[in-house]
Amino acid sequence: MTFDVEIVRWHAVASWTWNAGDDVCGICRMPFDGCPPDGKYPGDDSPVVWGVCGHAFHLQCIQKWLQSQAQTDQRCPFCRRAWEFKAAAPSS
Amino acid sequence: MPPLQPVGNRSQTKPQGSSKKLVIKPLKSKPSLPADFEIKTWTRLQDAVQAVHAQTPVACSLEELYRAVEDMCLHKMADRLYAGLQQACDQHTKAQIEKLAGSQAADEVLFLRQMHGCWEEHTSQMLTIRSIFLYLDRSYVLSASSVRSLYEMGLQQFRTHLVHHAEVLRKTIAGANQLIEAERQGESVDRQLLAHLLRMTSALGLYDDSFQAGFLEHTHLFYRAESQRLIQEVEVASYLEHCERRIQEEYERCQHYLEPSTRRHLIKVVEQQLLEAHMAALLNRGFDGLMAEQRTQDLARFYTLAARVQALPALKLRLKDYIRTSGLALIMDEEKDKDMVQLLLEMKSNLDDIVQQAFQKNEGFANALKEAFENFINQRQNKPAELIAKFMDAQLKGGSKGQSDEQMETDLDKALMLFRYISGKDVFEAFYKKDLAKRLLLGRSASVDAEKNMITKLKQECGAQFTNKLEGMFKDIDLSRDIMVSLKQSSVAKSKFPLGIDMNVSILTSGFWPSYPIQEGTLPAELNDYQAVFRDFYLSKHSGRRLVWHNSLGTCVLKVQFRKGLKELQVSLFQTIILMLFNDTAEMSFSDIKAATGIEDRELRRTLQSLACGKLRPINKAPKGRDVDDNDVFFLQCRLLDRQYQIDAAIVRIMKTRKTLSHKLLVNELVVQLKFPIKGADLKKRIESLIDREYLERDRDNAQVYNYLA
């Protein structure tokens, strides 16, 4: 069956954002899609990471936080549960 | 040295035995001058002086006279000799000047010639007298400090008598001034005569007080009157030309007959009267016109003349004002928005030329130009920044056809220069970003190199902060390409892309790009599938992200059936969504389409209009017309033929059963049978066509009734 209208090519445009519920990082209070205070570029250069507790922060922000805490007592600054990086971040 | 030896033969030459001594005895009586020596000698000299004055031959030779002077001096008669000579000369000079005082010369030139003759005679006679009395001049005059040299004495006497006979001096000076004025009026005068007379006043020490002061006053009045008249009569350019010529003439005057010391004062008076006194009028009345007409030569003259009277700051101010006013008029005129950047560039280039060629590349003027641009261009909010960004966009899209890369770069550089004047850089950035996004997403850039070049330049102008988002956009485009390549090579693509649509996706990092409003639209099933495949693939590579689709930025290439054949169309995603509906349905109403696509009302109307009322019309609309109404019906253009066939078939069907039917009744039946809306005119056309093809005929008695022909 032939159609009177047929698609040959499609150029689609999408934008990506971090899939991190709250729109701002709980540490620096900047949007996830923006830069943390020391970051230069948004996006790939300012990655967002998740803890097993489900809370997300800019990678730079949580690293700074964890460094400021005792090695033996690394907790999520939000829920105070032990901090552990989640292997794969949620996608939707 | 050898010891002196007596020389033998010397004694031989000695006169033998002549040992007489030479004895010098005192004179018996003291030698004395003859008693009449002084009176005789003086008489001889006096005669000679009189002969010189009378210009008659001198009785004795100059040698004799010289000796006579020397003798008198040696015998201590120099003071009396000097006094006698002084008196003789004084009498003569007095007589000469008196003769001038009684001159009946008919005009001043004649008088001046007489004056000059008298002076020439005086100097030449004084020289002759001096050579006769040279000894006196060199001995007595030098040793007695209060006594003038003979030549000086002559000048002194000439001056005394001239000053005494004030009328003679006054006439001389007035005559000279008259000659000069005549020359200023354009007559040719005896410059030689003037030179001689002025040198005379200078030699007599009368130049400064008796001539120069009055002459400068004269000049002042002359040029004051002339400039006041001319400034009213002629336009600025010719006035300036006149000033230049006048100043040149005065310089020449100095070369030819005025004393060098006069030049500075004279030129100053001329400049003051011609230029300084009228500078404000010249600037206010003429400058703008010369600028507007780009009269480079006249402007250069203006500049040099203004520099003479320290009016460059005023000229510069005027220039700034001119640029500000004309620039403001340009950018405030909304009708010129379309060409604003081009016009600004032309204006800038013309002004640069003027600064270069007329204003001697004066840095202060170049700065004034810059400041004026900065001033006026920021008087209108946002628009200039927007239009400069737009101009760059047009250039980066390829500008005018046949433009070389070099031309593109110079045009961009020029626009960048305008951009420098803009203080609202953020406004520019927003527009530049919007345009750049379009170029990148629609593949409209003429050259990637030119794009990157431009970013580098903007970075130099405004720093990395300004451009890092723009650079991020380029990075996104590169990354998107990489993702598409890896998706197409994956097994997913092979198993899940069976329809052969060539899909590409640009994935934007939200922070880099302009924000786009989300616009809803229900994708055709096949595109929905593709989109899901891509999304799954992308999120499997990039965890922790979500994707937002920008339907309004999507584009497609379609193959569409037209009445005249298949055509490939470049369309928007919304146009695609609408067109694809017609593969399943012959015709749809506006509300059907709205329900099926989920496109927002205004966007939908606009898109339908573009499809049904544009140049190419893949879709036809009933009724025709530009506005999209809620009750309008749409169908593919290629199916128009089908409709004609349906109408024809219905007419034949009805007429075959009824055999004879009036027009009105036929139309009524047709409306019942045909399910699509039709216009009476279209039906009439179909009926005519069937009559032509001899399916029907008009009844012979009633034209409103048709008969069926078997």
Image: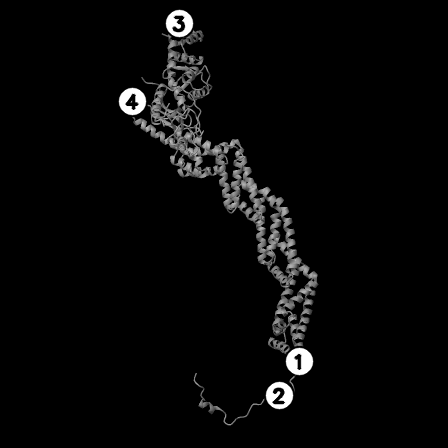
Q: Amino acid at mark 2?
A: Pro
- Towards the viewer: B287 or B473: B473
How far apart are the alpha carbons under marks 4 and 3?
Answer: 60 Å
**How packed is label 4: few (under 14 Cα within 10 Å), some, or many (20 or more)?**
few
Circles 1, 4 touching at the beta carbon (< 8 Å): no
Which tag, 4 or 3, sits closer to the chain's start?
4
Q: Disc 2 vs disc 3: which is toward the camera?
A: 2
Image coordinates for residue B161, horizontal then vertical, percent: 69, 65
* Secondary structure at numbered mark 1: helix
Image coordinates for residue B539, horizontal then vertical, percent: 35, 25
How far apart are the alpha carbons under marks 2 and 1?
Answer: 24 Å
**How packed is label 3: few (under 14 Cα within 10 Å), some, or many (20 or more)?**
few
Which tag, 2 or 4, sits closer to the chain's start?
2
* Residue B134, image quadrant: bottom right
Q: Which residue is mark 4?
A: B495
**Is B175 on the left or on the right of B507, as rendered?**
right
The chain letter for the residue carrying disc 2 is: B
Circles 4, 3 touching at the beta carbon (< 8 Å): no
- Towards the viewer: B616 or B327: B327
Name the residue located 55 percent from the left edge and 44 percent from the top edge. B316
Image coordinates for residue B28, horizontal then vertical, percent: 64, 88
Which tag, 1 or 3, sits closer to the chain's start?
1
**In the rendered image, residues at marks 1 and 3 fall on the same chain:** yes
- Towards the viewer: B185 or B700: B185
Q: Which residue is mark 3?
A: B658
* Secondary structure at numbered mark 4: helix
Q: Which residue is mark 1?
A: B37
Q: Which residue is mark 2?
A: B26
